[in-house]
Image (cartoon, rainbow, N blue to C red):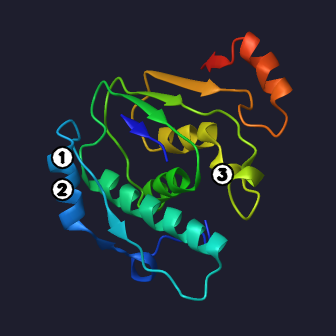
Amino acid sequence: RCLSDWSSDVCSSDLWAPETDLMLQNNLLAHFGELTSAIVINPKLSPHLTPAQTSDEVHKQLGCAMGDALSVGNFITTGDRVAVGSGRAVYWVMKRLVDLNRMFNLDKVSLMSLAGALYPQHHSIANNLRLDADYHVQMLASRFQKPLDNLWFLSHPIVSANPKPILEIGRASCRERV
């Protein structure tokens, strides 16, 4: 299972709730038989947003819709290993689970960061450390009532304007098991 991909700090369903595109969602499920679920939305967007704000808002709405689905579904089950990515939509998934106070009562679940530390100025209109996959893993971990089986974090940056430090880190072990 993999959760990978901000404008305001609220996913108020009255303000953001996009329409679900059920026809496209069903077509995806029919075409890709290995998919167990899909979430397709038609975002509600203000015509007054800049392109960068529009991009942020689409990520927010998609993340909130996924958070809603995770909060009522059985996407995560006992014994799962869940890989969590970075980015705006993933942040909103985790934020939505926190806001809904969704708690999972599951055993033997492991969480793993897929992307480690990022430099978020490369990904959005505003610098925001909430884009970090390690942070997302911590947010998701807070939603479990029972102790998790394992947590894995990538403790080094893997995105950089200068690739030299990344290559040096690549020679060392960058997976840290907690």
Describe the element under mark 3 as helix, strand or loop: helix
Q: How far apart are marks 1 and 2 (CA)?
A: 6 Å
What amino acid type should be assigned to the residue bearing mark 1? His
What amino acid type should be assigned to the residue bearing mark 2? Asn
State the mark number for residue 21.
none
Image coordinates for residue 23, horizontal then vertical, percent: 18, 65
Q: Which residue in the structure is indicated by mark 1? A: 31
Describe the element under mark 2 as helix, strand or loop: helix
Sequence-wise, the earlier of marks 1 and 3 is 1
Describe the element under mark 1 as helix, strand or loop: helix
- Looking at the image, do the residues carrying marks 1 and 2 touch, with CB atoms under 8 Å apart? yes
Where does the C terminus fall, quadrant-wise? Answer: top right
Q: Which residue in the structure is indicated by mark 2? A: 27
At horizontal 44% and vertical 77% (from top left) the residue drawn is 16
- CA neighbours of label 3 inside 10 A, class few (<14), some (14 to 19), many (20+): many
- CA neighbours of label 1 inside 10 A, class few (<14), some (14 to 19), many (20+): few
Image coordinates for residue 76, horizontal then vertical, percent: 31, 38
Compared with residue 123, is residue 142 higher up or lower down, i.e. above or below?
A: above
Q: Which residue in the structure is indicated by mark 3? A: 130
Quadrant for residue 170, please give it.
top right
